[in-house]
Amino acid sequence: MTFLSLVWLVIPFCLGFSIYLIPRSEKILALMTAIISAAYASALFLEKAPLSVQLLNSFGVTLVADQLSAFFILTNALVTAGVVLYCWHSDKNKFFYAQLAILHGSINAAFICTDLISLYVALEVSGLAAFLLIAYPRGDRSLWVGLRYLFVSNTAMLFYLVGAVLVYKASYTFSFEGLAKAPLEAFALIFLGLLVKGGVFVSGLWLPMTHSESETPVSAMMSGIVVKAGVYPMVRFALLLPEIEPIIRVLGVGTALLGVFYACFEKDTKRMLAFHTVSQLGFILAAPEVGGFYALTHGLVKSSLFLTAGELPGRNFKELQKTPIATPVWIALVLASFSISGFPMLSGFGAKVLTMKNLLDWQVIGMNLAAFGTAASFAKFIFLPRGGDGKTKPGFWPAATLLIGGLFAANIAYYDAYNVANVLKPLLTIAAGWAAYWFLIRGTSFKLPTAWEKFEHLTGAMTLMLIALFWMAFSRSSYIFG
């Protein structure tokens, strides 16, 4: 299995470069990368013990593949496959599919890295591939959004790299475990890079513009899987280092509330989905023990929602409320919205129940408020008028069938969630959220400020977050050792 793991790791890159060598092969090869990753993730679920690979002794690359990795890898496989199917009949060229395969491979690498330098390389490669996909249309707007993303991402990763060097100076290793012996500034610098890369809390305010202004399939990739490359290491840190776990849980609750608060009052469909990406990443971090299953569910939901939003006649909710949409598209939109709201029979239900059961006492109120806000904001989609006419892109239904079908299939992973108390609570939360939408949100014209999203403010937000992280680490260490 170790040899197969190394082969699986390099296959997406080989297939990505092969796209230029084999005529009319780009779609098939890009889809093959996803299929191979899905097969590898399935094999990992059957492994009883984690697979560990160490190359070049303690100074080299350390890889670990276990069930947590399997959830994230499977998410990457399904989202990538959905995007390839969506673009199958489009005019996307070899360059697009090659970058898609390279992005897929670099994110896979991030999901099995357990040393700081290998993770840095994987995240940088994924950031470059994501930039090229964002800028693919070559328009002024897409180039600006792509360069903005690249600048913010690379700046944050420079902080991360300095933190990694400080870890090595303190512990003579780049492994994740070395963070336990590292100085506070190393923790703050590394986490700043990961928070920005993952789109977490105020460090993720680059995300709404980037995701909403990208092309529909790129938005689906960015929200469904790319940001999880920054979240995964934080989940791994929480499981490896108990002293760091409370900080990650705090960030999870804050992120969930911040994102859902903005989403409730957002009038643009893609921006609302982008803010919900921020919020749902908070759910992953709030309960790290079950973060893998929530990541899988969120990846399927959010990629399907972005693809479906691309089939709507507009992006403004006020206009959509007056324009009936095609009933089949509405059904796809409702099923995904039900799942993310926690409705039974879809995997979002089990993911939310499992997350709520693994919260600490102080997290419960905040995360229940986030769940309530999720139901209220997605009522905007559920109560859109239906019955209109409209053609969908040829690849939409194969992609939607795969992703939404995955929500039904993943629902069986936690069948123990189905008891009266677990079913009743999310139904009441959803009902309360719908009521809030009808009586409070639907008619409001309130708009939250977006100044924090401006380019010139993003680096300032990094500085503030760096100070906050240092303070959190200092407070935690004083509590443990003082």
Image: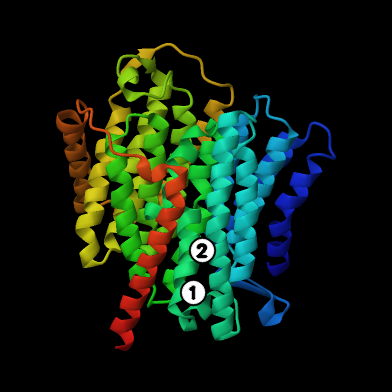
* Local SS, label 2: helix
The quarter of the picture where the N terminus appears is: bottom right
Q: Residue at x 62, y 69 (%)?
A: 117
User: Is residue 42 or residue 400 the one in the foreground?
Assistant: 400
Residue density around tag 1, few if under 14, some if 14–19, many if 20 or more, within 10 Å:
many
Q: Position of residue 111 (x, y in %)?
A: 57, 60
Rendered residue at 30%/41% (across/down): 262
Please, is residue 98 above or below residue 352 in the view?
above
Residue 82 in the image: state x and y as whole percent.
Answer: 56, 37
Q: Residue furthest bottom?
A: 482
Q: Amino acid at mark 2?
A: Gln
Image x and y of residue 448, in percent:
28, 38
Name the residue rendered at 46%, 70% in the picture. Answer: 237
Q: Which mark is residue 67?
A: 2
Query: Which mark, by number, is residue 186?
Result: 1
Instruction: Judge whether 89 appears above or below 476 on screen.
Output: above
> Picture coordinates of residue 227 (x, y %)?
50, 51
